């Protein structure tokens, strides 16, 4: 991987609490597809680091991760996340973010997922 830490501006709150953390977006390969893959891998590494930190604090590490929105349709993005998170990231039957929010609300209210 390219070791990117993609941020829009300096500063991070989670999983690293550092208001001065600079984005890391170099080296920039000539191939745009490789650059984009590096960005996605960087995002997935940040996600994995967040899950590991939560697990260190006592939360269960996820056994799978569900995604909604446009990324749910993107098989290469799901594969990158599966590889770096170490858990399945299956394609969602329902991709609308409101569906995911409704599932969380149902679960929070004592309903089945």
Image (cartoon, helix red, strand yellow):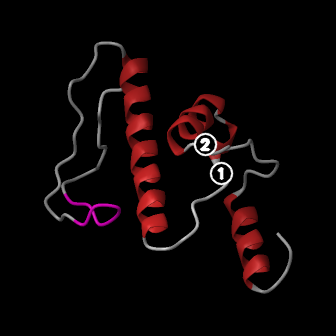
Could you tell me which residue is drawn at 31 percent across and 43 percent down? 6
Residue 10 falls left or right of residue 109: left
- Pick the residue in front: 90 or 94: 90
- Is 20 contained in the magenta span? no
Counting from the top left corner in percent of width and height, residue 49 is at 40, 53
Residue 81 falls left or right of residue 14: right
Image height of 67 relative to 18, above or below: above
- Determine which residue is flagged by label 2: 71
Could you tell me which residue is drawn at 29 percent across and 33 percent down? 3
Figure quadrant of the N terminus: top left
Could you tell me which residue is drawn at 24 percent across and 23 percent down? 28
Image height of 81 relative to 48, above or below: above
Residue found at the far left of this picture: 20
- Report how far apart the C-alphas of labels 2 and 1 lie in the structure: 7 Å
Q: Assess whether mark 1 and mark 2 are in contact (beta carbons under 8 angstroms).
A: yes
Give the secondary structure at mark 2.
helix
Counting from the top left corner in percent of width and height, residue 22 is at 16, 49
Could you tell me which residue is drawn at 13 percent across and 60 percent down? 20
Frontmost of labels 2 and 1 is: 1
Counting from the top left corner in percent of width and height, residue 45 is at 41, 44
Q: How many marks?
A: 2
Question: Which residue range is magenta in the image?
Answer: 11-17
Residue 69 falls left or right of residue 40: right
Give the secondary structure at mark 1.
loop
Which numbered dot is residue 107?
A: none
Quarter of the view holding residue 112: bottom right
Residue found at the far top of this picture: 30
Which numbered dot is residue 67?
A: 1
- Pick the residue in front: 36 or 82: 82
Q: Main secondary structure of the magenta part?
A: loop
Counting from the top left corner in percent of width and height, residue 92 is at 76, 47
């Amino acid at each position: 991987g390219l070791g990117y830490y993609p941020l829009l501006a300096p500063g991070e709150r989670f999983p690293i609490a550092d208001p001065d953390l600079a984005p890391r977006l170099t080296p920039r390969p000539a191939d745009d597809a490789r650059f984009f893959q590096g960005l996605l891998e960087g995002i997935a590494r940040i996600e994995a680091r967040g899950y590991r930190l939560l697990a260190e604090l006592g939360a269960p590490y996820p056994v799978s991760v569900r995604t909604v929105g446009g990324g749910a349709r993107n098989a290469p993005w799901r594969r990158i996340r599966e590889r770096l998170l170490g858990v399945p990231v299956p394609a969602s039957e329902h991709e609308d973010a409101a569906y995911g929010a409704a599932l969380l609300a149902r679960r929070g209210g004592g309903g089945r997922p």
